[in-house]
Amino acid sequence: MRLVTLLVALLLGACEAPQPPLVVSGVEVTRPMPGRHMSAGYLVLTNNTGEDIRITGVTSPQFASVEIHETTIEGGISRMREIEELIVPASGSVTLERGGKHLMLMRARNVQESVTLHFMSGDMPALTVEYSFEEQ
Amino acid sequence: MNPRYILVAILLAATLAAGIFVALRLQNPAAPEFALVLPAPNKVPAFSLVDQHGKPADQSVFQGQWDLVFFGFTHCPDICPTTLQVLAAAKAALEEQGQSPLPRIVLVSVDPERDSPEIMAEYVSYFGDGNLGITGTLEEVSKLTSGLGIYFKKQPSDGNNYNVDHSAAVLLINPDGGFHALFSGPHIVDNYVNDLPIIMADN
C-alpha cells in the first residue's frame, strides 16, 4: 500500500506543470509625466531555479532606452546609479521599488495604454512583461 | 477582603492614573514626533531665481505662508516624484481634516540647466494646484541651498543624460521666511499629517 502511494505521488509530481524559472509580480509602471519622457518601473522578480539568474539588460518597444537604477539615501543624500547587472538569487527574489532599485525608462516613444518589457540574461530572453495602465 | 473595597481601590487607582496623565499632557503638549524643529528659525538666505512662470523669485517668496520645500530635479524618475507625491497626499489629508493654514509645496531645482520654467510649470502642476517651482542659474540656486545646508552635485556622464545627487530632506519654512523644521527621509504621509498641525499651531 505504501508503495502504491509513493508511485501515485511520483506520478502526480511528474504531471505537475514545470514552474517557470523566472516569475514577475507586483508590476507598476508610472506614466510619463506631462512634458516628460521618462517613467519608472517597479516589480518583484522571483527565481524558481537553483541558480542565480543575471538580468543584464531590459528593452521596451515604448522606450528608446531602459536602464536598471538604484536610488540610495546615505547621510541624507539621495543618489541614483545605474546597475550593470541585476542578480535574482537562486530560489529567491529581488524587489524593484520606490526609493530603491528600479527600472528607469527613458525617451518614451508613443506610450499609449500599455508597456512591454523584455528582460535579457546575456543574449537570452529571460522574461517578457506586459503592463497595462488601464487595469490599474 | 470585601469586594466593595477592591472596587473602590481600583476606582481610586484609575482616577489617580487619569489625573497624572492629564497633568503630563498639560505640562508637555503634543510634540512633533518626526520633524526636527530648529531651536531658532534660520532666515532663508538672499537669492535671485525665477518661478515656474518665469517671474523673478527671491527670498521674499517664502514670506506669508508655510512652505514644504524639496530640492530635486525633473529628470529624476524615482525619488523626486515619490517625495512630491507624499507631500501632495499629506496636504490633501490635512485639507480633509480641515487643517488651516495648509502648507504650500515648493520644488527648488538642483538641475537648473535642464529645468526651464516651462518644464517646472508642467512638473509642479502635476502634483496639484498652488505649488511653486523655482529654478534659474546654478550660482543662485547654490546661494539658496548652501545657506540651508542642502547638498547637490551633478554626476559626470556622457551627454545630456546625467544624474544629480541631492539632499533628500524636506524643509519647512515658516511664514516669516525662516527655516523652521526639517523632515529627513524616508518621507511618509502619516508623519507629515501628524507633525505639521502641531508645528504650525505652535507658531
Image (spheres, rainbow, N blue to C red):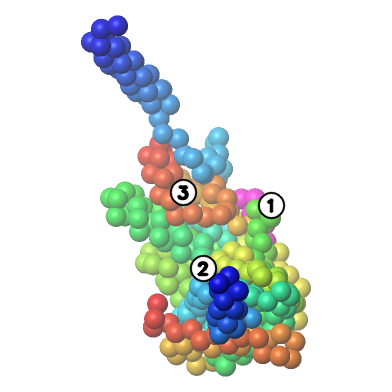
Give the residue at mark 1. Answer: A75
Check disc 2 and give the amino acid type.
Pro
Neighbour tally class for label 2: few under 14, some 14-19, many 20 plus, Cα within 10 Å: many
Viewer-closest of B78 and B123: B78
Check disc 1 and give the amino acid type.
Gly
Q: Position of residue B91 (x, y in %)?
A: 38, 56
Viewer-closest of B11 and B149: B11
Which one is closest to the eye, mark 2 or mark 3?
Answer: 3
Q: CA distance from mark 1 to mark 3?
A: 20 Å
Same chain letter for marks 1 and 3: no
Secondary structure that dominates the magenta span: loop
From what the image shows, is residue B17 above or below residue B182?
above
Q: Position of residue B64 (x, y in %)?
A: 40, 50
Instruction: Inspect this view and state whether residue A29 appears.
Output: yes
Q: Secondary structure at mark 2?
A: helix
Marks 2 & 3, CB-CB < 8 Å contact: no
Which residue does the image show at 39% across and 81% down from the upper left?
A135
Give the magenta-colored segment's residue range: B148-152
Marks 1 & 3, CB-CB < 8 Å contact: no
Viewer-closest of A81 and A102: A102
Check disc 3 and give the amino acid type.
Asn
Task: Check residue B81 in the rendering and tell me which mark sits there, or answer none.
Answer: 2
Neighbour tally class for label 1: few under 14, some 14-19, many 20 plus, Cα within 10 Å: few
Q: Position of residue A24 (x, y in %)?
A: 56, 77
Q: Position of residue B39 (x, y in %)?
A: 55, 35
Which residue does the image show at 52% across and 44% down from the upper left?
B35
Give the residue at mark 3. Answer: B191
In which quadrant will I find the N terminus of chain B? Answer: top left
Q: Chain of mark 1?
A: A
